[in-house]
Image (cartoon, helix red, strand yellow):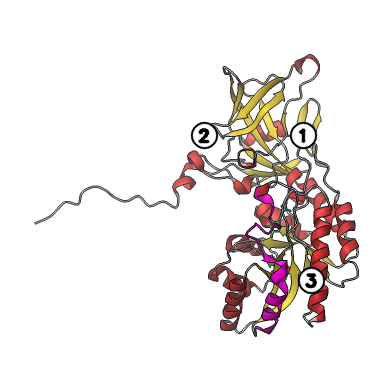
Amino acid sequence: MNSFHYQDGQLFCEQLPVAEIARQEGTPFYLYSHETLVRHYQAFDEAFGDFDHQICYSVKACSNLSVISLFASLGGGCDVVSGGELFRALRAGVEGGKIVFSGVGKTVAEINAALDAGILMFNVESSQELDLINELAEKRSMVAPVSVRINPDVDPQTHPYISTGLSANKFGIPISEAVSLYQRAANLPNIKVVGVDCHIGSQLTKVSPFRDALDRVKSLIEELRRLKIDIHYLDIGGGLGITYDAERPPLPAEYAQAVMGVVNDLGCGLIMEPGRALVGNAGILVSRVLYTKVGVTKNFVIVDAGMNDLVRPSLYNAYQKIVPVREFTGKEIDQKTVDVVGPICESGDFLAQERLLPPLISGDLLAVMSSGAYGFTMSSNYNSRLRVPEIMVIGKQYQVIRRRETFDDLVAGEIMVDWRPKVERS
Ligand SMILES: *Cc1c(COP(=O)(O)O)cnc(C)c1O
């Protein structure tokens, strides 16, 4: 469910015509629905009912401060994977005690910042990282809370770039080595083992891989307890998929039932790190048609947003639905197969290929649906294009939550060397 719908012949976000925002703010821009964000968060939260749980929103899906702080206002914490994301979470008002820190390459500076913030736990991904956290915690006379990220070697049946729980992936500790690492962790003076973590991939559309992974993790927790290593938290990661096209991912309630079915008698608090499921279908990318071009073998619709603004189609060959902002009805819907492409100097710069769309003309607005997750956060300045604004609709109003960049922003960090020859004075 989301809050983008046609009304009076045009696309609305909540109670506001998308075209109205385009008129005032120009294009392209990302548009998020406040109502959808709240509804998705609550659906996820309510699915786990009274079961002891904490949602730690995966910041990398959509990192805007207003999005993070909205979830924080609903009780959410954060899953961060860099010092920058930790900074954002803290800036957005998330309590340190609700932040988990994941990622295979945490640096000294990042670990120190997380220790200072008093985070809930580090999700440790290697034996060397564990030693470094111990050493840095000792220097601060602290005890660092950790869980170990387990790689359960299950196939999440998703795109290879976003599967993380296979033995061939760089993530986590092989489950076969987990017990010995936990035993070592339990004996390190400045480490406190608090949990077990497992995140197997993204855009999962079945519950079975989650269940398989959790079965393995559950056996591990039981074994650790026999060894007197107590586990308080089970972090089940993120990864629940959304509908981009015709996928039928489990509803949060089905996912929650499956999870609780496996872990119910373990007595662990659950931590979950959803990203895409909360924000994916709460956002769109709005772009304007610049030109239409009839090619020899293909027809192109050239729009003002490109792969630098939304890279998923180019990077993962991902399908994202595209709809016109003015509604086409009746005879007008004489659909043609087109490629929707951006202005970037790369043939990989497309938002859609071989897509049936009504006859668009220059000036028409298009909405790329399901762009809330891994949309703006993966955008870049490639081709020296300005990063676009992020806007949130709240009922009948909208709020710019990140302004459009300016040319000055583009070069703000650069230093221009003075190459003119120095004049020798005698
Ligand atoms: C990316 C990521 C998530 C979120 O994944 P989604 O598929 O967006 O839910 C959660 N945990 C970790 C460790 C991640 O890297």
Q: Which mark is residue 220?
A: 3
Q: Which residue is found at the position 70% from the left and 31% from the top?
A: 19
The answer to which quarter of the image holds residue 230 is bottom right
**Mark 2 crowdedness (10 Å alpha carbons): few <14, some 14-19, many ≥20:** few
In primary-sequence order, the first of circles 2 and 3 is 3
**Cα distance, mark 2 to mark 3?**
48 Å
- Residue annotated with mark 1: 12
In primary-sequence order, the first of circles 3 and 1 is 1
Instruction: Name the quarter where the C terminus is drawn.
Output: bottom left
Q: Which residue is found at the position 77% from the left and 40% from the top?
A: 396
The answer to which quarter of the image holds residue 266 is bottom right
Q: Which mark is residue 346?
A: 2
Direction from residue 108 to residue 357 in the image, left or right? right
- Magenta residue check for 286: no
Q: Nearer the viewer, mark 3 or mark 1?
A: 3
Q: Which mark is residue 55?
A: none
The answer to which quarter of the image holds residue 134 is bottom right
Direction from residue 83 to residue 277 in the image, left or right? right
- Magenta residue check for 173: yes
Q: Which residue is found at the position 85% from the left and 48% from the top?
A: 250
**Mark 1 crowdedness (10 Å alpha carbons): few <14, some 14-19, many ≥20:** some
- In the image, residue 375 lies at what x, y percent? 65, 44
- State which region is magenta: 161-189
Figure check: 119 above or below 41: below
Q: Residue furthest front?
A: 176
Figure check: 121 above or below 285: below
Q: Nearer the viewer, mark 1 or mark 2?
A: 2
Q: Is mark 1 within 8 Å of ligand 1?
A: no
* Near-viewer residue (395 or 180): 180
> So how many labels did they put on this image?
3
